[in-house]
Image (cartoon, rainbow, N blue to C red):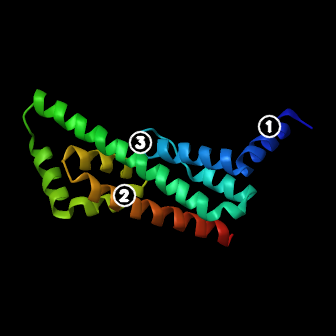
Amino acid sequence: MQPMDAWIETVKAVLASPEYGLGGLFAASFLSATLLPLGSEAVLYGLLAVNPSLLWPALLTATVGNTLGGAVTWWMGRGAEQMYEQMTTPSSLHGRGRRWLARFGPRACLLSWLPVVGDPLCAVAGWMKLPFWPCLFYMAVGKWARYMTITTVFLMR
C-alpha cells in the first residue's frame, strides 16, 4: 500500500468513529464560523461518506459548532465596537450600517450561513449591539437550514 493510500485509510477510519469524527466536525464547524477562512462542508461530506448512520448527530454537531462559532464572532464584534467607540467618532458608513441592521434586527443573522459575508455579519451584529440571544437563535436556524440543504444535495447524488 502506498503511503498516501495508508494515510487516506487512516483518515477514513478516524472519521468513521463517532467520537473522533463528530469531534472533528464540531471543531471544523466552529472554526469555519469565525473569521478564519475555513469550511466545514468537506468534513461533513467525509463523515457521512464513511458513516452514513451518523446523519442526524452530524447535522446537530455541525449546526451547534457553527452556531457557537458565530456567537464567538458576535462577541468579537461587540468588543471591537467598544474599542472603536473609545478611539474614534462614528462615520456616515457606520450610520448606514446601523440603519440597515436596525431595519432587519436579529433576523439579519439568518444570513450568517452565506459564504464570505455570513461570518462578518455576525461580527457586525455584535458591533451594532443587536440582542445576543435572538441573534444566536437566528444564526442557529440559518445554519441548520444550510447544513440540511448541503446534506440533502449530498445524499441525492
| SS at circle 2 | helix
Q: Position of residue 104 (x, y in %)?
A: 21, 63
**Image position of 113 (left or right of 92):** right
Circle 3 residue: 34
7 to the left or right of 74: right
Q: Secondary structure at mark 3?
A: loop
Tell which of 141 and 96 is nearer to you. Answer: 141
Whole-number angstrom distance, CA of label 3 to CA of label 2: 13 Å
Q: Residue at x 66, y 72 (%)?
A: 156
Instruction: Name the residue furthest top.
Output: 87
Q: Badge 3 local density, few (<14 within 10 Å), some, or many (20+)?
A: many
In x, y percent, where is residue 144?
A: 47, 63
Residue 90 sits above or below residue 119 on the image: above
Residue in view at x 71 percent, y 48 percent: 15
- Identity, as a three-letter code, of the amino acid under mark 1: Trp
Between the C-alphas of marks 2 and 1, the distance is 36 Å
Comes first in the chain, label 1 or label 3: 1
Question: Between residues 23 and 121, which one lies in front from this camera angle?
Answer: 23
Residue 62 percent coordinates (x, y): 53, 54
Toward the right, the furthest residue is 1
Amino acid beneath label 3? Thr
Residues under labels 1 and 3: Cα distance? 29 Å
**Can you identify the residue that label 2 sits on?**
139
Instruction: Evaluate if marks 1 and 3 touch, with contact meaning CB atoms under 8 Å apart.
Output: no
Which label number is shown at residue 107? none
Residue 116 location, x and y as percent? 40, 49
Q: Which mark is residue 7?
A: 1
